[in-house]
Image: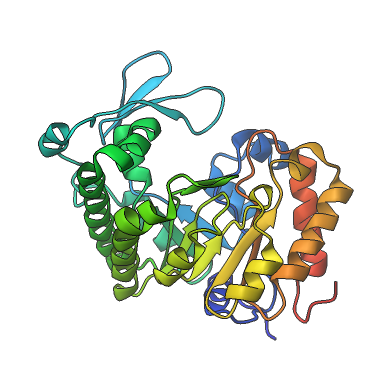
Amino acid sequence: MAELTSAERLLCVLQRQEPDRVPHFEWLVDRRVREALCPGCKDYTEFAVRMGHDAILADPIFRKERVGERRWRSEWGYVVEYSGEEHGVEVEFPIATMDDFERYRPPDPHAPGRYAAIEQVVREFEGKKAVIVHLNDVFSLPRNLMGMENLLLAIATEPELVQALVNLSVDINLAMAREVAARGVRIVYTGDDYAGNRGPLMSPRHFRELFYPGLCRVIGGFKELGLWVIKHTDGNLWPIIDMIINSGIDCLDPIDPQAGMDLGDVKAKYGERIALKGNVDCAQTMTFGTPEAVAAETREALRKGAPGGGFILSSSNSIHSSVRPENYLAMLRTLETCGRYPLSL
């Protein structure tokens, strides 16, 4: 097969076909790993280009104001505290009751400048790299507005409030999806995590009643706009995986090995319906292992996920600050050696 562009390669995979080679990108590479591998690299986009990633990521822009030494209030109204990591932790929340919800006003999805970063990336990379925009579906925004503990409690005690938050999330993300589609974006991903290592954060019954209808509505709306959808969620998804796939997603990420999600099992059961992305273990192997161990696990991920196409190689979540730079490099070098079709593992 002739060499494809990165954009062509990703679209081929999302159609569950074999491209020229297995593509790669990561949702996040921590600045410390970026600096070790690409000294002087100014941002993640430059790093992705220099490292040969097949996708460039972009987000809508939301304002934030400093409210403490390490705390910032987002335009959504919740407060995030930052440590040494690139991503902070939500610590204060604007909604606790239905009265709070009824008074709440979310950011305007049509605000001037909201999509400036996306417009810049599309201008620079359209037709060359796949441009992927981060939106949400039904869990992250309710969690950020209430806090995880309060939201999980409300699932049992105030389901009407949870349903209202889910509907808000669906409506505003569909509005943003219309904006990004109009700017030439073809792929979105949603980063809402539903599960931990032991299983979903709520019962399958509660997921079906409170979250699944909204998930179907938001994914269906993305698809009506002509967008391809990559769904990210960590954890043990087996009790709810059928609902996630039935919502209409095109690709599931990251098939979390720490939570008992075997890539080969998911490929065998669902590989004719969705593409897969994952799943070299970034919690253990890439953090504490050797480059040789990472190379072996990379080959195993390719062996399980790549035959027949429809596979994107990546870590099992992200390249966080504790990942050894030499281990990430070992994954990339193994992909370069072993990831071209026809496969020879």
Q: Position of residue 287 (x, y in %)?
A: 75, 38
Quadrant of res 326: top right
**Residue at (74% x, 62% y) in the render:** 301
Q: Which colouring convention does the figure follow?
A: rainbow
**Residue at (68% x, 63% y) in the render:** 263
Q: Name the residue nearer the viewer: 8 or 14.
A: 14
Left or right of 127 on screen, residue 102: left
Q: Quadrant of the C terminus?
A: bottom right
Quadrant of res 155: top left
Q: Position of residue 238 (x, y in %)?
A: 56, 59
Left or right of 169 on screen, residue 86: right
Q: Residue furthest right?
A: 292
Q: Position of residue 302 (x, y in %)?
A: 75, 67
**Residue 298 is at least partly visible in this image:** yes
Vertical position of residue 44 compared to residue 304: above or below? above
Vertical position of residue 252 compared to residue 82: above or below? below
Q: Residue furthest top?
A: 69
Q: Name the residue nearer the viewer: 1 or 219.
A: 219
Q: Name the residue nearer the viewer: 40 or 129.
A: 129
Q: Position of residue 172 (x, y in %)?
A: 23, 53
**Residue at (50% x, 63% y) in the render:** 241
Vertical position of residue 273 compared to residue 298: above or below? below
**Residue at (43% x, 55% y) in the render:** 204
Left or right of 188 on screen, residue 304: right
Q: Residue furthest bottom?
A: 1
Left or right of 90 on screen, residue 9: right
Q: Quadrant of the N terminus?
A: bottom right
Vertical position of residue 48 compared to residue 223: above or below? above
